[in-house]
Image (spheres, coloured by chain):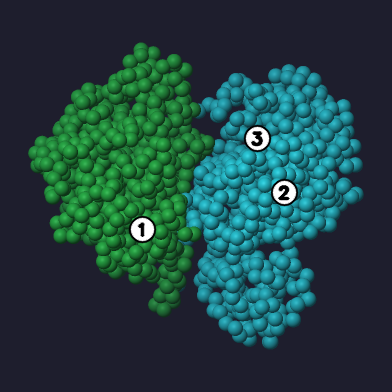
Chain colours: A green, B cyan
């Protein structure tokens, strides 16, 4: 018998390896627990489920639990109202008798709207596991947390976990167009099937919502910031309402982008002037209409007077004028307005990095209470590394939403493996010194620093219709990590990566350790082979892919971003240059402004550095720059080797897919390195440092965009 | 032991039901064979695999076999060169010693380039199963056929199957745009990731190729007939070559659409006149360039002087002039040119149904040998039913490609369940009487009737990036059926449906029988609730979705297609009208032209029928028309009930998805019925017949496009 079962087991495993995984299940694979001890522990502690209440969200929580336990433990947890049995899992709010009688009111009070705790409690002469919250959604979050413990093979014998989200609005921004394309999307098309809505709810909407709930993402802006006014028509509101209904039980509120000229485009008005009485009325009526269809609609996200989008500036009104008109339409219904601070005039010769601050900082205090301003993490545009956005800490009267980008618009699309947890951590823990030391961006956006009730964080999504949702299998980690950092801006990027790898791939240390290392270094590696030492925005401007420090067209000149000349490289943003450093608090202003104290990874952001400049290492700047590029490429090779070594530890499908992507990434890292080094060499006229082999081709070869050498 | 294995088995089954299927595996699920007798038979007959040759295609065939047998039988077939064992499966061409020594040369000779046979032969004192062909691709087709036998639970004890495709070029047409959208696509976006090509080969390309090989589809036109000239640039040819490399082992040749104005758009020439020497040279060079990258490139598909596309007519040249220039560029390389006959002037008042015939028939004999003309199955545009295209049989000197449409542009997108096997059958078996009785369209396109070497059949694909490839789970059947009918135009639509249901869902008769019935009636049901009795092209012209017999804009007037007035309905295409009947051979011309003998399902295509006209049934035309609409809606309800009754027989995922789609289809069938009946009633001024309950709303309600009542 043992032999036969063993054979069957082998065949099953073999089946899994042969069949491979397609990534659809994301990190919610609920892989069977093979460890006998762990399995026994889990089974004994989760024998009964006590749920004393009903609601769509409670149902979702129960279904997820049952499905997960079936998969992980091959067991069907039985539902009972009797807490008297060993192995009871009691979940709920005070609406559940079983929870109510546990005398947890004081602890619950501290949890707020979405928090939860998971605790092992005494129940008679045995223990029980309790997941409790004030609201149903907290229960769902707690259930996902418990399942995460189990997927990461942690003990649940004695649990004492309490989690309260630090940021209120934790929102994905989908730059999805109504025609099914996704701007800066590299993982297929939009999953929102507007043609089939409202009648048909695609299974993907549900699995999307589950993934969000599992990491605490509680909002989704469904459409592109380059907005189509059609989204606000009755027809599309009805379709959106059906989507909202599908997402609601999972705690995901729906938001829409609002095209500022909608009063003209769909309202038939002659103007969209935010101070025009008809326009004000139109927005008020439109908001009422929206809330008629979607009573808990989140609000609008607006991109105005940016990159050709209409806005209040078209009528010589301020951003505050524009935002407040729409915000006042939303306010009676509890809605918020997120107004993007991604505004700049694309003027050659001016410092783009200063413009958003100059435009918005003076408006601090002029926005209505339900307006949040949404800057990107840096003042240029989602570069692999930027100095942080000086607006953070500079607008104490205005809640600011941090806008991260999960889709890798400047980070290698869906081809390069880049774990952004490192980036999230870096910017969230950045000290602005706005109120002295410790004034981190995390505290700014959580509302703690300046005591705001409203708080928010946004991630431009990398999710599309690809079977595995994100194109590159590892890109899923950025969706996961965004949720984790949004919930807790103080999260640890290594722990987040650890959990994700365990759930998505394997708990096996032989896999986990090298792959985590690979992930944690990946962002810096990409910085190194693309834009080291504070370089930025030197990609192919047309495609946003591959190197383009030589790029020039009537609208864009890469030189504006790197200022390469015979003297050196980098943009002087000190007092002798654009003086962007003045937008930062002390002591940052001084430390950024001093070539000796500026962090080396921002050197070229703030300084025009002579090729000969001697670095702290004692080597010349030119040599270090080149070596940084070569380091990046060498690191990709290390990633490739590390990945090769874990073959066989996961399914062939995903293993091979990542392997091939890493191969491509290596070729493109060389393209970046060689193109940039040869180009900058045409200014430095210096030899490559020892150990850096000459590129295989001439500069013209690397310039033959879109890709050389095929 | 028995109990434990049973429990494990139950859990596995339960897992499958809980987990559900997402449709990604199409009809190649290779579901585990639970029937012990069958399993024993298969295992005993397929114990060894004898393959005496190597090639990419042979490898693909082996891999498919191994994977399938592992899934179906939980066994690993061992490879051996020794045919002496029982249970040998010997596959190959004469290049394999094991095949060579079986003395099959004479039988192989008759198989042609792609044919194969599967036979049980004597091998010593036992039998062996042989799959043999002249070329490797035939072996792959044979392997898929054997696996189909097994998936449909047929005995393989004694096989004698020989299959030779009747049509040479069996091609999918993908109306995919380079930006990832699909024109008339309802199942997600394009799966061709042009940005990641040529470096990354998506797993989907392989599974797409497998699906095609499994039904004998041997070509794919990768891009939209509304072509983007960029597809012919070096950059894109290199990307296409990578795709071609990936598809080649599966026998799928790559084709591209060619924009007629490409010489200007990407060649920099001042003209695209096909008789201009520079233009001729440009096409010749371009073809040479294409074949440099893709040595076995199939050829071009061209849409010219149709719906705004550039063409020879822009230079006052004929279609033949235009086609021949490009064809001559392809000829030295063995390429073909498929020239679409979908040409019409959108002129109100003229009979569109006559135009393609008038335009192309006189050109018969004027096209070069490697040109095929490609008309749709009817002379208007993929309507649920049309009179067949009069070009079939009318151009004896020109090989014609039948263009079917798998994507349901006029058939309910991805929401309505419509099995098109019935439609394929109807048109392929249509007798044209071109050379007397028996001059079926099947014989026209196979080349048999008029003795052409070249032959082709095309299907506008319904495949996209949706996880299940086609949106509606049942839409997969149209991809499958197209392949089967392309290989054998004489196929039986019921047998095709039978096999598909077995492989895709279940061999259980309790499921198979009612679901087959549902499928076989579905096309006529859709005809009934949309456009019965020969009505056509009365949908919403803007969306191609939902009814629009009232539709009118500056370019389109639905009235041109139905001619409703106080007298009656339908378009007079007899001698007293547009005389389109003259384009058909006798006796069709006469029988179509006589209101008493015209098939009732084409009545309104050929005749303007008075509301009072007495039908063969004795009832008035008006009554029958209305009853046909009501019949269609009633049939959808029957489909819903039939589907409800099979709950539990397949996975919940796909069951629920189809259930919800059928619910939506029912609502939309009512929308069609009520909108059309009320609209036509405004002309007939007659009461609805007994038994037809009055619509719930006024006509204005049903006109409130895009969808009423939400």
For residue B325, the mark is 2
- The residue tagged with tag 2: helix, strand or loop? helix
Percent coordinates x, y for residue B240 in the rendering: 56, 55
Q: Which mark is residue A674?
A: 1
Residue B365 shows in this picture: yes
> Which residue carries the number 3 mark?
B308
Answer yes or no: are tags 3 and 1 on the same subunit.
no
- Kindly indicate whether the residues beneath marks 2 and 1 are on one polypeptide chain: no
Look at 49% across and 40% down and name the residue there: A180
Q: Is residue B94 left or right of residue B248?
A: right
Taking the spot 71% from the left edge, 59% from the top edge, the residue there is: B332
Drawn side of residue B285 relative to residue B365, left or right: left
Gap in angstroms between the C-alphas marked 2 and 3 = 21 Å
Q: Quadrant of residue A647?
A: bottom left
- Of residues A523 and A691, the one drawn nearer to the viewer in this rendering: A691
Reply above or below: B567 against A616.
above
Q: Is residue A61 visible?
A: no
Q: Are marks 2 and 3 in contact (CB under 8 Å)?
A: no
Real-space Cα distance between discs 3 and 1?
45 Å
């Amino acid at each position: 018998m043992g032999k036969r079962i063993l054979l069957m087991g082998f065949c099953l495993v073999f089946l899994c390896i042969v069949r491979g995984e397609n990534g659809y299940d994301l990190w919610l694979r609920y892989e069977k627990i093979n460890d006998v001890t762990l399995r026994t522990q889990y089974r004994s502690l989760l024998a009964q489920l006590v749920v004393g209440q009903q609601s769509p969200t409670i149902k979702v929580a129960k279904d997820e639990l049952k499905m997960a336990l079936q998969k992980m433990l091959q067991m069907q947890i039985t539902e009972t109202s009797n807490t008297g049995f060993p192995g009871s899992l009691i979940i709920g709010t005070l609406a559940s008798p079983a929870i109510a009688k546990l005398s947890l009111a004081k602890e619950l009070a501290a949890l707020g709207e979405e928090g939860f705790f998971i605790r092992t409690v005494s129940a008679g002469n045995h223990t029980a596991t309790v997941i409790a919250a004030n609201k149903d959604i907290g229960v769902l979050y707690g259930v996902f947390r418990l399942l995460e413990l189990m997927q990461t093979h942690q003990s649940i014998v004695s649990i004492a976990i309490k989690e309260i989200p630090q940021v209120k609005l934790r929102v994905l921004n989908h730059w999805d167009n109504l025609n099914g394309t996704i701007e800066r999307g590299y993982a297929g098309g939009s999953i929102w099937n507007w043609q089939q809505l409202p009648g048909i709810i695609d299974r993907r909407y549900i699995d999307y919502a589950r993934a969000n709930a599992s990491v605490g993402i509680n909002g989704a802006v469904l459409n592109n910031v380059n907005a189509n006014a059609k989204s606000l028509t009755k027809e599309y509101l009805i379709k959106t309402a059906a989507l909202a209904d599908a997402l609601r039980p999972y705690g995901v509120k729906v938001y829409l982008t609002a095209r500022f000229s909608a009063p003209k485009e769909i309202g038939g008005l002659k103007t969209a002037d935010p101070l025009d009485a008809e326009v004000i009325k139109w927005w008020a009526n439109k908001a009422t209409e929206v809330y008629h269809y979607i009573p808990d609609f989140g609000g609008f996200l607006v991109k105005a007077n940016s990159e050709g989008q209409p806005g209040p500036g078209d009528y010589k009104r301020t951003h505050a004028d524009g935002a407040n008109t729409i915000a006042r339409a939303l306010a009676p219904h509890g809605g918020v307005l997120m107004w993007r601070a991604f505004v700049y005039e694309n003027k050659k010769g001016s410092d783009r990095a200063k413009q958003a601050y100059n435009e918005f900082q003076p408006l601090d205090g002029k926005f209505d209470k339900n307006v949040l301003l949404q800057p990107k993490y840096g003042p240029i545009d989602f570069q692999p590394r930027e100095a942080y956005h000086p607006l953070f800490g500079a607008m104490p009267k205005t809640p600011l939403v941090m806008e991260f980008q999960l889709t890798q618009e400047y980070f290698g699309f869906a081809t390069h493996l880049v774990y952004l947890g490192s980036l999230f951590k870096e910017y969230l823990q950045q000290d602005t010194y706005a109120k002295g030391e410790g004034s981190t961006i995390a505290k700014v956006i959580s509302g703690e620093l300046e005591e705001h009730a409203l708080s928010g964080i946004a991630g431009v999504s990398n999710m599309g219709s690809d079977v595995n949702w994100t194109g590159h299998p590892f890109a899923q980690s950025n969706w996961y990590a965004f949720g984790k950092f949004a919930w807790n801006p103080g999260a640890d990027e290594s722990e987040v990566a650890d959990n994700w790898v365990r759930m998505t791939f394997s708990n096996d240390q032989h896999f986990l350790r090298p792959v985590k290392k690979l992930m944690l270094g990946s962002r810096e590696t990409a910085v190194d082979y693309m834009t080291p030492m504070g370089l930025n925005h030197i990609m192919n401007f047309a495609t946003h892919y591959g190197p383009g420090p030589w790029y020039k067209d009537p609208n864009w000149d890469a030189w504006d971003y790197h200022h390469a000349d015979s003297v050196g490289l980098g943009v002087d943003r000190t007092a002798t240059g654009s003086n962007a450093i003045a937008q930062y608090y002390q002591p940052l202003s001084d430390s950024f402004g001093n070539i000796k104290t500026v962090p080396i990874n921002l050197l070229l952001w703030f300084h025009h550095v002579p090729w000969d400049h001697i670095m702290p290492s004692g080597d010349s700047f030119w040599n270090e720059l080149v070596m940084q590029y070569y380091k990046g490429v060498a690191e990709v090779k290390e990633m490739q080797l590390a990945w090769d070594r874990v073959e066989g530890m996961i399914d062939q499908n995903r293993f091979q897919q990542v392997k091939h992507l890493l191969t491509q990434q290596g070729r493109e890292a060389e393209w970046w390195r060689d193109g940039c080094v040869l180009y900058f060499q045409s200014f430095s006229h210096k030899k490559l440092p020892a150990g850096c082999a000459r590129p295989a081709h001439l500069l013209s070869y690397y310039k033959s965009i879109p890709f050389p050498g095929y």
